[in-house]
Amino acid sequence: MTTPSTTVGYSSYFERKSNMNKLLATLISGLFVSSAALAQTTTAPATPAVAKAEAKADKDVAKAKADEAKTAAKADEKVSKADAKAAEKKADAKADADETKHKAMHKAAKADPEDKVKAEAKADKKMAKADEKAEKKVVKADEKTDKVKADAKADKAEAKAETKEAKAKAAADVKASTTK
């Protein structure tokens, strides 16, 4: 004999499974109905002239996109080269300043005790001048990098505009061929 609780458990399991099957069947039938409705919409058959115009338009747009990508890659390469060159110049400027400072401090340390204060003041001047010179080199390197970045941005924008123009021209050509 089965207890009522186990019987209820089985029936609710099958009831849930049946409800899920019904839901799944409804969803699938809805999918078939919507796909059948979409299949009934017809488009005008493309004439050979339209097909040819569309093919040419696709080719022109693809070429424009490729040119845009190539221009962007070249611009990015120029920027990365400029960044690397600027980093090298900055490192050289810092190294030159450090070397000048070291020489100035070494010279001040070797000075006679009675001339020590004067030598240290002279070393301080040399160190300040070395820092100034290094800072100027850093600023100049950053300016050059910024100019290259601005040029790259302009090149990318120009290439994007050319791609947009090619797309518009292609769409116009296709539209013109449909009226023939």
Image (tube, rainbow, N blue to C red):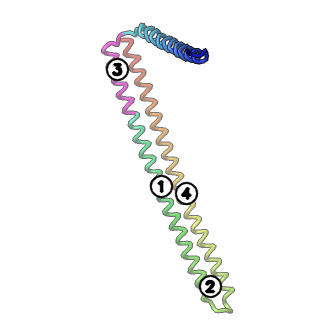
Residue at which label 3 appears? 53
Q: CA distance from mark 2 to mark 1?
A: 39 Å
| Element class at badge 3 | helix
Residue 108 tag number? 2
Q: Hey, which quadrant is residue 70 in on the image?
A: top left
Question: Residue beneath label 1, please?
Answer: 82
Binning the other alpha carbons within 10 Å of mark 2 as few (below 14), some (14 to 19) or many (20 upward) gives many
Q: Position of residue 10 (x, y in %)?
A: 55, 16
The answer to whether the residue labelled 4 contacts the one labelled 3, judged by CB atoms less than 8 Å apart, is no
Q: Is residue 118 magenta?
A: no
Residue behind mark 4: 142
Label 3 near label 2: C-beta < 8 Å?
no
Placement of 110 over or under 52, stated as above or below: below
Mark 3 residue crowding within 10 angstroms, few (<14) / some (14–19) / many (20+) = many
Magenta stretch contains residue 57: yes
First to last magenta residue range: 45-64
Q: Amino acid at mark 4?
A: Asp
User: What residue is drawn where x is 39% and y is 29%?
Assistant: 61
